[in-house]
Amino acid sequence: MPTLVMKFGGTSVANLDRIARAAKRVAVEVANGYDVIVIVSAMSGKTNELVGWVDETSPLYDAREYDAIVSSGENVTAGLMALRLQEMDIPARSWQGWQVPLKTNSSHSSARIEEIPTDNINEKFGEGMRVAVVAGFQGISPEGRITTLGRGGSDTTAVAFAAAFDAERCDIYTDVDGVYTTDPRITSKARKLDKIAFEEMLELASLGAKVLQTRSVELAMRYKVRLRVLSSFEEPSDSAGTLVCDEEEIMESNVVAGVAYSRDEAKMTLISVADRPGIAAAIFGPLSEAGVNVDMIVQNISEEGRTDMTFSCPVDQVLRARKAVEDAKSNGSINFHDLVTDDGVAKVSVVGIGMRSHAGVAAQMFKALHDEGINIKVITTSEIKISVLIDRKYMELAVQALHDVFKLEQAAESGRR
Amino acid sequence: MPTLVMKFGGTSVANLDRIARAAKRVAVEVANGYDVIVIVSAMSGKTNELVGWVDETSPLYDAREYDAIVSSGENVTAGLMALRLQEMDIPARSWQGWQVPLKTNSSHSSARIEEIPTDNINEKFGEGMRVAVVAGFQGISPEGRITTLGRGGSDTTAVAFAAAFDAERCDIYTDVDGVYTTDPRITSKARKLDKIAFEEMLELASLGAKVLQTRSVELAMRYKVRLRVLSSFEEPSDSAGTLVCDEEEIMESNVVAGVAYSRDEAKMTLISVADRPGIAAAIFGPLSEAGVNVDMIVQNISEEGRTDMTFSCPVDQVLRARKAVEDAKSNGSINFHDLVTDDGVAKVSVVGIGMRSHAGVAAQMFKALHDEGINIKVITTSEIKISVLIDRKYMELAVQALHDVFKLEQAAESGRR
């Protein structure tokens, strides 16, 4: 029988009623003829409770004990889901990470999956079991200790199982009904996408559309796992949710898939830096060590032998960034005239694989912003993304204008997106 | 280094403060030079919450899933205890049942321990670890699934570890400070025993002094594990708690160790049963099948060929018992004239290994009750116990009178009990 992976997040299994509702979804797919692997998170709130206890007991905790403790929430859900399915006369059983065994490396609390042997579970499918309920987020290290994959790791568990079992699809049930062209809170014209390419999803996820753990999308892209995001609170249908898939599956699409934003950015400029080979490393090394997440970087040529260096970072890291840069100046590793900070900026980006073959997207974007009287402070581009920094007060306006100019409220004419 | 097993029950690890307090006790024993194996229960209330979810999800649950779910509470406590000890600079780590592995049979929810390999934990002791924190109550079946030992199974886990690791002692920390000569709520003269023999403890436990799981005492007796019961809420001292040990360790003792009682008993008499070989089986077989816990049994000879048969059971099983007996009469497997029920009785027992060598204990007991005007309805005896059924209203009076007549408020003259 073909295999399907279904993953239910914390809000989808928050209590016994929701577990029962999720079990009904599973029953539908069993009736459709699938052998189903269900990946479950902890009931919402449970993991936070456990993390709180760990933090209170030991602020600098041993990550091996942390993992042993926080993984317990998923085990409870897995057992309850198996029982619920059995009550519906569906042969089901639970697996904890070490029982599969889902083998990881020893990087506790952020372990990487190394191998998922399929024989245990396939043997049970062969004996008539229809659903394997697997506790998400957890695995076992070479030393035989429990590991966890980092917060949100159940998405990654699901994709890894889909890859290992060559599943037809991996359905991620969550509390949103799919991926949108932009945040519906900013424009009511925002439209749910039927399909989106892996690369686009990666850019949108890291830009703030927090639907899927980035790592799970990377993994899905590498193993070409068709990933569907859908809500566990709406009636299921074939067109439900958004399919994240290889771009070849998307026949025709808008040039731009979506508009993303990040509200609380800051722009910092080092004026008249003494330019020399290695100067970038001398600046960004100390910033990295100070834990500053530098995002955009632009270097302008100014007078001879000197340059201006501009970068952006989250606004709550400005103090840390300033100290790192000034310490570097004090100890003589860099030299500049002035440090100018603008902590009132936001980032707006347009993303789309269609850009690769369509020139003029950037020009269209800049003109649209200019027409609204929005000044662009910094620009960076990649093959499928253009990002700008603008005054924060114009952020909503910019998103709305870009959504309009790229006609994102309409699906592409072939109707495939 | 010598090994000590310390077990903390649910109320002793009910929250982070209590876990910290328990950890301090462990630290004292580490400082005393012991390698310590700590067995922990779930934080109090947690197991009941999980059991509630299982019952609500699936009334006739799959015991394998039940075990996987309800065992998770102990895992959390084990990790938190290990972290707390690490914070006190004591090298410690947690073990879940399957990691030891504590091997059991496949009788889920009431599994029997088959083997506890010591090499894993001893290897870590050899590397400098001082405390192994083990999740109680759980093990792993030959099929690789999680099993549990039944409610209160953490006591059994502790004793089994003490036997496997040849521990010097097994300390059971609980919410009472030891085993008493009788219930202090009935007489203020009740005195904590410093020592009690395994056999006595078994008789007292099954009679209602619910301090230790009966199975754990049986196991301790078989492997001669010295078992100490003490409170985690009092300051530790050498004389703290009660040592449950081999009778050879008790040099001199009172003839009677304690007075136990069971308040809610019923007495049922089958009048004029047609006597024949196998009649007892014909009566008590159906009662057992109906789930009636028959305790005392007395058979009186009456007229020729007929007999009276009296037994006791918990008062809330009277209806079930009556139905079982009457059904047996209807289908002709037994025959009797009348069934008389007295549901207003209580059982009072005196227990002591000293009875074996002292005659006259029974006579002393019956006289003491007679002096108080208490009528004895049924008597049963074993080598180290005499039990009587009396009217329930006299129960407290009987316990007080027996406690006085056997001078239980005073320790034996050698001072060893």
Image (tube, coloured by chain):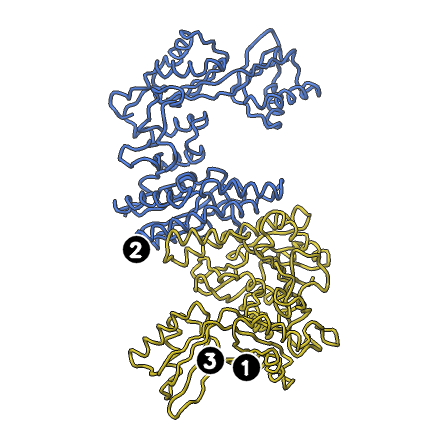
Chain colours: A blue, B yellow
Q: Which mark is residue B297?
A: 3
Which amino acid, by three-letter code, is at mark 1? Answer: Thr
| Residue A358 position by quadrant | top left
Residue most extreme to the right:
B414
Residue on which the image places disc 2: A128
Which amino acid, by three-letter code, is at mark 2? Answer: Gly
The location of residue B5, given as percent across then percent down, is 63, 61
Q: Are marks 3 and 1 in contact (CB under 8 Å)?
A: no
Is B415 or B33 nearer to us in this picture?
Answer: B415
SS for tag 2? loop
SS for tag 1? strand
Is B417 or A217 nearer to us in this picture?
Answer: B417
Can you say whether A81 is above or below B182 in the image? Answer: above
SS for tag 3? strand
Q: CA distance from mark 2 to mark 3?
A: 50 Å
Residue on which the image places disc 1: B381
| Nearest to N terminus: mark 3 or mark 1 | 3
**Could you tell me which chain the residue with mark 2 belongs to?**
A
Is A368 or B159 nearer to us in this picture?
Answer: B159
Q: Quadrant of the C terminus of chain A?
A: top left
**Is A110 on the left-hand or right-hand side of A357?**
right
**Could you tell me which chain the residue with mark 3 belongs to?**
B
